[in-house]
Amino acid sequence: MGVKILGIGSYLPEKVLTNFDLEKMVDTSDEWIRTRTGIQIRHVAADDEATSDLVIKAAREAITHANIQTDDIDTVIVATVTPDHFFPSTAAIVQAALNLRDVPALDISAACSGFIYGLILANGLLKTNISKCVLLAGAETLTKITDWQDRNTCVLFGDGAGAVVLKLTQDDSDILAYDWHADGSLGELLIQPAGGSRMPATKETVEKRLHYIKMQGREVFKHAIRCMSESATKVLELAGVGADELRLFIPHQANIRIIEAVRERLGLPQDKVMVTIHKHANVSAASIPLALYDAVNEGKIERGDLVLLTAFGGGFTWGSVLLRW
Ligand code: ACO
């Protein structure tokens, strides 16, 4: 019995914000953003659009692509740090909107590594027969927790959702190896300080803008390169696969300079690395499924190809999954 990824879907909000738009909002420039991050545009959810709205659209496409009945899905997982509410979970809202009977539904919080964590959890649920068909989404509306007065962070993030359907089948598994980690001692380097039980939302926390993303970018940058390179290398070793055998490497899209540094450490040519940062910006848990979706639809990968996914994010969390697509 093996775990197969049967279908994939994605959704990006209609509104697009360019670097030139940002020049009018904070002291920044298209040139700085492009050269320091690789980002050119980002999609921004509408005021009345929540994370579940994005997931529902991506999920419908994934279900159609998987060619299954909605009733086949027996577990819903949404990886996000921008849920509609703390509770009910975004996954529960999605379950109801898609009329998925009373199947279990849960959110997972692993920031930019959320989709990788989700794949590893879904793989475990399927392999132990707890679930037979999992709908997994990575989705964010990061622009809702972005401080539009802080040029250090507001140029970096975007919104979107990607979803996959995973099923236990008689065939060989698509998930060949995985590796996942966390280091909570460094959590404060990338944090949304207020709004939780440590610092409940008050007039003062809002005035101090503590409910927005705070990041020590340079520190995060260094850890991201080291952790992503180590994890990618480890998962290849676990599977006994050489980097040269990969058809495509799909890293989390946070910064083109991080992607380039990891690519060099793995010894991969540029044409084997998926880059979507210019058009999506950093979409946290949605970045890898959105990039995987584009890779499939642009014909960059075909069934049977070896594809390596690697992410790093708040927590800190990081990890990799090696797929035979
Ligand atoms: N426009 C113009 N200047 C800017 C901007 C901006 N938007 N932002 C910062 N600067 C300035 C800074 O103020 C600083 O000026 P100073 O030298 O006068 O103080 C200068 O540019 C350099 O700032 P750095 O922070 O050192 O810039 P750096 O080259 O490190 O790039 C960045 C910053 C893009 C944030 C980078 O550090 C980065 O990508 N970090 C990693 C982000 C990441 O990987 N996140 C992962 C997970 S995200 C998640 O989990 C939700």
Image (cartoon, rainbow, N blue to C red):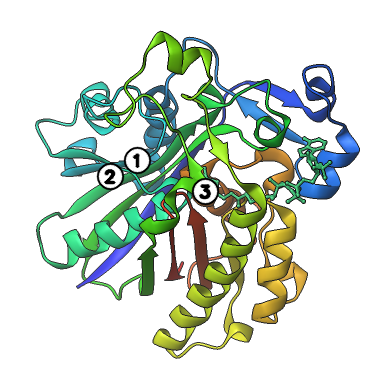
| For residue 153, above or below residue 88 | below
User: Residue 186 or 17: which is nearer the viewer?
Assistant: 186
Q: Along the polypeptide, which appears first: circle 1 or circle 3? A: 1
Question: Separation of disc 1 and disc 3 at Cα?
Answer: 37 Å
Q: Say which element carries label 1.
A: helix
* Pair 3/2: label in front: 3
Q: Is residue 91 above or below residue 8?
A: above
Quarter of the rendering occupied by the N terminus? bottom left
Q: Which label's residue is closer to the chain start, 3 or 2?
A: 2
- The answer to which of 256 and 13 lies nearer the viewer is 256
Residue at the location (19% across, 44% down)? 75
Three-letter code for the amino acid on which mark 1 is drawn: Ile
**Exactly how many numbered labels are in the figure?**
3
Q: Nearer the viewer, mark 1 or mark 3?
A: 3
Q: Quadrant of residue 42?
A: top right
| Of 146 and 75, the residue lying toward us | 146
- Tell me the tag on residue 68: 2
Quadrant housing residue 222: bottom right
Q: Earlier in the sequence, mark 2 or mark 1?
A: 1
Q: Is residue 299 visible?
A: no
Mark 1 and mark 2 in contact (Cβ < 8 Å)?
yes
* Residue name at image x 63 percent, y 85 percent: 244
Q: In this figure, which residue is indicated by the disc labeled 3? A: 189
Indicate the quadrant where residue 139 lies: top left
Report if residue 86 is visible in the image.
yes
Q: Is mark 3 within 8 Å of ligand 1?
A: no
Other-residue count near label 3 (Cα within 10 Å), few / some / many at <14 / 14–19 / ≥20: some
Pointers 1 and 3 in contact (C-beta within 8 Å): no
**Counting other residues with Cα less than 10 Å from the Cα at mark 2, is it few (<14), some (14-19), or many (20 or more)?**
some
Residue matched to label 1: 63
Kindly identify the residue that appears in the image at 71 percent across and 39 percent down: 279
Residue type of the residue flagged with mark 3: Leu
